[in-house]
Image (cartoon, grey):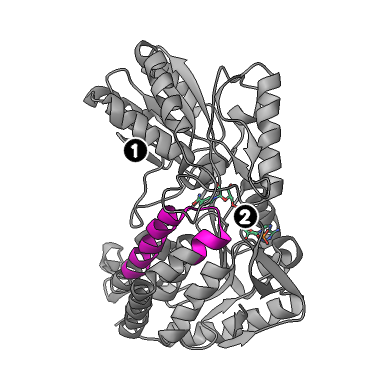
């Protein structure tokens, strides 16, 4: 596929292979964008911002609705490309393809609800003659940088509200999974989005990132990705708005009074969805002592039944890790944990045609010094910890420097409220694992998990800014 700059699809001699992480077969190629391409995209987006800001809301809505129609028509095509270039199984990819339609549809709806309010200027003596209001205007050029793990819907979470809010965009998708993003850009073009309003540069973040991030024409950076890259971007960005959707190491608490079978099922799914490469995936599972042994055995039995590897097969439960390098890193963390005394309950092996398949892996007795305890694994590994009192589970859940989602499974209203108020994070799920989200809820983290919120209505707040108008009559 090609890059989209100023309404034109551009190719280059220098290419990047996009491979299927299961067997490393080449799915397609994309051009390797460089700093000249970045300059072209920023200049096109600067012009595009003027066009986007002048586009009436009914036209923005109509374009977004047409994109949603295309997503519906091509739902299976999008699912296939997500499943080919990324880690997801075809069943998981179909879920993401549907969610992308939903995200764009909500964006079309929310475009009509960008409102301000009148201001009571006469509340201050001397201002009696003044009348006025504030409304929200677009920020201008938005730089959207996206990760590999939801290669379509996390792109839609930036493009949908950015376009709804009257902004232009330069998108830099993850280098390992740019195809879903480019297909979505094709849909925007087919839907009649004017040239320059959406530009997509493919290329390596560590080569072209700084030029994109530091440029003064960019008025907002909307970044989803790892904490390391996020921190780097905040240092390089200078004075501009920043939205940061970063990583986590999500805790889920299972009380002895929880509805047992659904609790096991949701925790297993939450741990291994998208091969554990999920910012709200369950990594730390705190289980109350009276049910600990029974829960552990049921959890492990379920994990061991997973069919792992060939992600395009309809009955595959979990695909590969995104690259061999990532699979080796996770394997290294597993080995470190075993050496430091953690007990491996199941899984732990790496294999598959390209060495990217890791079995669903469950540990207990994980020391606090192990990376599998304190860092984000972003792979199919989960730790079980027994606890006595809810207070101690909440303290343990809060003890790390992440705060995206947390969860509690319980039939006690008292425990649910105690956890909802006590857990330090952007969202507490009650009777789901941390891995629950719909696309219109405010989504984002505290501490090192991020800054700001996504979820269309909330992204629109970030992607527009108030302007006051005051009449001295
Ligand atoms: P990543 O390595 O941080 O990459 C994310 C994006 O940033 C990619 O497009 C990458 O480009 C780009 N990038 C890397 N270095 C950059 C730089 N110096 N300047 C500008 N851009 C740069 O993350 P990932 O491995 O793709 O995704 C996994 C991470 O994303 C996890 O930590 C996960 O928790 C987080 N995540 C968070 C959320 C959320 O909503 N909170 C959702 C999903 C994922 P290249 O691909 O070219 O390196």
Query: Dominant secondary structure of the magenta stretch?
Result: helix
Does the magenta segment cover residue 340?
no
- Residue that appears at 34% across and 85% down: 59
Under circle 2, the secondary element is loop
- Residue that appears at 58% across and 82% down: 46
- Residue that appears at 33% across and 37% down: 432
Does the magenta segment cover residue 100?
yes
Q: What numbered label is drawn on residue 87?
A: none
- In this orientation, which residue lies closer to the viewer: 45 or 73? 73
Q: Are marks 2 and 1 in contact (CB under 8 Å)?
A: no
Please determine whether, in this image, residue 163 is positioned above or below residue 173: below
Q: Residues within 10 Å of mark 1 (few under 14, many from 20)?
A: some
Please determine whether, in this image, residue 284 is positioned above or below residue 162: above
- Residue that appears at 42% across and 48% down: 315
**Quadrant containing the N terminus in the rendered view:** bottom right
State which region is magenta. 81-105
Badge 1 is on which residue?
429
Q: In this view, does 324 lie to the left or right of 470?
A: right
- In this orientation, which residue lies closer to the viewer: 335 or 134? 335
- In this orientation, which residue lies closer to the viewer: 325 or 64? 325
Is residue 285 visible in this depiction of the protein? yes
Badge 2 is on which residue?
21
Percent across and percent down for residue 398 are: 49, 28
What distance separates the C-alpha of mark 2 from that of mark 1?
32 Å
Dot placed on the residue nearer the N-terminal end, 2 or 1: 2
Ligand 1: image quarter: bottom right
- In this orientation, which residue lies closer to the viewer: 383 or 83? 83
Percent across and percent down for residue 437 are: 37, 48
Q: Is residue 459 left or right of residue 41?
A: left
Under circle 1, the secondary element is strand
């Amino acid at each position: 596929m090609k890059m989209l700059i100023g309404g034109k699809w551009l190719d280059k001699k220098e290419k990047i292979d996009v491979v299927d992480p299961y067997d490393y077969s080449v799915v397609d190629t994309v051009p390797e964008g460089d700093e000249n391409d970045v300059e072209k995209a920023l200049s096109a987006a600067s012009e595009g911002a003027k066009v986007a800001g002048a586009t009436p809301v009914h036209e923005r809505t109509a374009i977004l609705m047409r994109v949603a129609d295309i997503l519906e028509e091509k739902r299976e095509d999008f699912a296939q490309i997500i499943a080919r270039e990324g880690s997801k199984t075809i069943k998981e990819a179909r879920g993401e393809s549907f969610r992308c339609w939903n995200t764009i549809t909500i964006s079309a709806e929310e475009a009509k609800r960008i409102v301000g309010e009148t201001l009571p200027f006469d509340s201050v003596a001397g201002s009696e003659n003044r009348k006025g209001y504030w409304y929200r205007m677009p920020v201008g050029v938005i730089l959207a940088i996206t990760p590999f793990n939801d290669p379509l819907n996390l792109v839609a979470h930036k493009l949908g509200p950015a376009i709804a809010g009257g902004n232009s965009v330069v998108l830099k998708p993850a280098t390992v999974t740019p195809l879903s993003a480019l297909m979505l850009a094709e849909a925007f073009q087919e839907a009649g989005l004017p040239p320059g309003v959406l530009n997509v540069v493919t290329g390596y973040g560590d080569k072209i990132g700084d030029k994109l991030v530091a440029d003064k024409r960019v008025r907002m950076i909307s970044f989803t990705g790892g904490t390391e890259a996020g921190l780097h971007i905040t240092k390089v960005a200078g004075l501009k708005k920043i939205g940061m959707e970063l990583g986590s190491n999500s805790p889920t608490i299972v009380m002895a009074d929880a509805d047992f079978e659904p609790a096991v099922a949701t925790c297993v799914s939450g741990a291994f969805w998208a091969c554990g490469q999920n910012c709200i995936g369950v990594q730390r599972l705190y289980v109350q002592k009276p049910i600990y042994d029974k829960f552990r055995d049921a959890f492990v039995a379920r994990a061991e039944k997973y069919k792992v590897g060939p992600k395009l097969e309809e009955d595959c439960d979990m695909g590969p890790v995104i690259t061999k390098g990532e699979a080796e890193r996770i394997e290294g963390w597993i080995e470190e944990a075993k050496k430091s005394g953690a007990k491996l309950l199941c899984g732990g092996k790496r294999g598959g045609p390209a060495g990217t398949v890791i079995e669903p892996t469950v540990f207990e007795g994980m020391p606090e010094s192990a990376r599998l305890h304190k860092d984000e694994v972003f792979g199919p590994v989960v730790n079980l910890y027994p606890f006595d009192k809810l207070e101690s589970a909440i303290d343990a859940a809060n003890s790390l420097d992440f705060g995206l989602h947390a969860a509690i499974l319980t039939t006690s209203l008292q425990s649910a409220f105690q956890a909802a108020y006590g857990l330090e994070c952007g969202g507490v799920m009650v009777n789901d694992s941390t891995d629950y989200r719909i696309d219109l809820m405010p989504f984002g983290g505290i501490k090192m998990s991020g800054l700001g919120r996504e979820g269309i209505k909330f992204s629109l707040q970030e992607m527009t800014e108030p302007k006051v108008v005051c009449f001295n009559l």
